[in-house]
């Protein structure tokens, strides 16, 4: 089993390009099911979650593969969707597989997708997705652990989500594109990944207004055309790299991103004392002598991203002063805390909040990755710790970061993969 070994102390210097956005890519791949024409996605990160989505698309009967001539592109030939069923053994590996439900029921009139079940960070139910499709006229039910949705043709409708859900918004928005008539989605997620998906759908012929706001209006069409899209840079990977530089007094430049989508992250890094020069598609960061403590609460976009919470906590573990980190989106997203404590961090949990008393130094230790962003947090801490940190179960990190150890090594980190 692979593990990553980090020897702390090196300051990070230099420039690094962020890979393409994992979360946007997964939604775009699901959207390819909406058309019977080919889809080509570029700037796709070589991460395990993309491989899993390729497996799901192929299980449905389309032909999806990495482009033989561009190892960061994916080609999806629609073929015949022989079985609109996404099997449990694939869906359980990646919750985002549930994004095929809306496209399948809109395109094929029926869909069977395994209920994704929970994961390390929470129960993660899908009732919001199901209710949204019911609003569009689908008959939706649970059968032997599978969510089934049927509708000869979906009908446009108004749907208001009970609370913000990113993939829920994406699922319903995709389905509504092929519904009969007009739909209005209220209390929609405003994440950049929703905007990116809407832009791709518009390029395929969909009529969508308001993506990125809490109210999205869609005029359904009978069919959609080909998709050709270059994914934006991954805002979470970029934030992770910037957090790493902040905690080791680094000076780095991250390129290939839309900095307009990183406002909350950049604000918090500034609050930690980092000096930033922000261009449209790159950020240059010069870290402080020692980070400053702060209070932060995760929230749906444009608030501070829950996907950056663990990485920022690793920075605050070494800050001057005491911080409070509150996780409002997921109910169990502090799995990194026991592992950071093993490295000497002084963190007390109190319900949804973590009280972090900054320490002068962390010490390297054998630690275990539990989920994607917790793994990233352990790498950030390991870069600053004294001695070696050995992170096991790095398959978690490979789900969402493309060769993170190579990116960091090129910036001067003493980091290697073993196994
Ligand atoms: C997306 O997950 C991202 N994943 C997550 O990134 C991210 O953390 C999350 O949005 C929040 O920003 C992808 O896009 C593939 P939600 P999603 O529905 O859409 C609850 C990463 O690290 N909920 O916005 O599944 C849910 O349990 C991943 O890259 C319901 O209760 O998240 C959570 O507590 C992790 N019922 C909250 O809402 C529902 O029907 C927000 O979840 C749907 C969601």
Image (cartoon, rainbow, N blue to C red):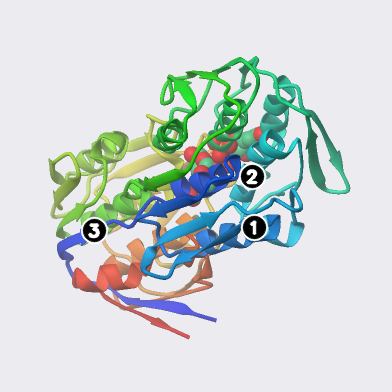
Is residue 96 visible from the viewing direction of this image?
A: yes
Query: Mark 2 or mark 1, which has the lower sequence index?
Result: 1
Q: Give the side of residue 109 with respect to residue 351, left or right.
A: right
- Label 2 close to label 1 by CB (< 8 Å): yes
How far apart marks 3 and 2 lie (CA) works out to: 30 Å
Q: Nearer the viewer, residue 171 or 260?
A: 171
Task: Using the image, determine if residue 24 lies above or below residue 221.
Answer: below
- Is 384 left or right of 126, judged from the image as shown? left
Q: Nearer the viewer, residue 235 or 67?
A: 67
User: For the residue carrying disc 2, how many other residues have a C-alpha within 10 Å: few (<14), some (14-19), or many (20+)?
Assistant: many
Residue tagged by mark 1? 56
Mark with earlier residue (3, 1):
3
Nearest the eye: 30 or 222: 222
Residue at 75%, 46% in the rendered image: 115
Q: Residue furthest right?
A: 144
Which residue in the protein does label 2 denote? 100
Percent across and percent down for residue 267 are 25, 36
Q: Position of residue 64 (x, y in %)?
A: 55, 60
Q: Write the residue at 24% across / 51% down.
A: 256
Spatial separation of the CA atoms under disc 3 and disc 1:
29 Å
User: Which circle, 3 or 1, is nearer the viewer?
Assistant: 1
Q: Residue at x 14, y 41 (%)?
A: 279
Q: Report which residue position mark 3 lands on.
A: 17
């Amino acid at each position: 089993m692979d593990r990553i070994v980090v020897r702390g102390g090196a300051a990070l210097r230099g420039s690094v390009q962020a890979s393409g956005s994992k979360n946007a890519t997964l939604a775009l791949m699901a959207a390819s099911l909406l058309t019977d024409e080919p889809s080509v996605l570029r700037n796709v990160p070589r991460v395990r979650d993309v491989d899993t989505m390729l497996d799901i698309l192929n299980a449905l009967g389309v032909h999806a593969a990495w482009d033989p001539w561009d190892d960061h592109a994916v080609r999806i030939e629609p073929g015949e969707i022989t079985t609109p069923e996404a099997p449990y053994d694939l869906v359980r590996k990646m919750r985002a597989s549930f994004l095929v439900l809306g496209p399948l029921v809109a395109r094929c009139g029926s869909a069977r997708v395994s209920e994704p079940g929970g994961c390390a960070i929470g129960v993660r139910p899908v009732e919001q997705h199901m209710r949204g499709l019911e609003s569009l006229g689908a008959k939706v039910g649970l059968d032997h652990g599978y969510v089934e949705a049927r509708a000869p043709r979906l009908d446009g409708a108004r749907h208001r989500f009970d609370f913000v859900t990113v993939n829920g918004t994406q699922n319903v928005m995709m389905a509504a594109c092929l519904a009969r008539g007009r739909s209005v989605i209220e209390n929609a997620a405003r994440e950049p990944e929703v905007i990116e998906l809407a832009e791709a759908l518009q390029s395929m012929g969909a009529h969508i207004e308001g993506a990125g706001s809490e109210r999205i209006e869609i005029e359904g069409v009978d069919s959609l055309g080909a998709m050709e899209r270059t994914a934006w840079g991954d805002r979470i990977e970029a934030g992770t790299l910037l957090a790493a530089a902040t905690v080791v007094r680094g000076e780095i430049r991250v390129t290939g991103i839309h900095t307009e989508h990183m406002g909350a992250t950049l604000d918090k890094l500034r609050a930690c004392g980092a000096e930033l020069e922000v261009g449209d598609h790159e950020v240059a960061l010069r870290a402080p002598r020692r980070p400053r403590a702060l209070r932060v609460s995760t929230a749906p976009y444009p608030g501070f991203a829950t996907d950056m919470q663990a990485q920022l906590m690793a920075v605050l573990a070494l800050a001057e002063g005491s911080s409070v980190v509150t996780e409002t989106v997921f109910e169990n997203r502090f799995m990194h805390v026991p592992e950071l404590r093993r490295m000497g961090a002084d963190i007390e949990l109190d319900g949804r909040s973590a009280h972090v008393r900054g320490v002068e130094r962390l010490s390297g230790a054998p630690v275990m990755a539990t989920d994607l962003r917790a793994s990233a947090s352990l790498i950030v801490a390991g870069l600053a710790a004294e001695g070696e940190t050995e992170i096991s179960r790095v398959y978690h990190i490979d789900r969402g970061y493309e060769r993170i150890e190579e990116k960091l090594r090129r910036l001067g980190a003493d980091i290697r993969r073993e196994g």
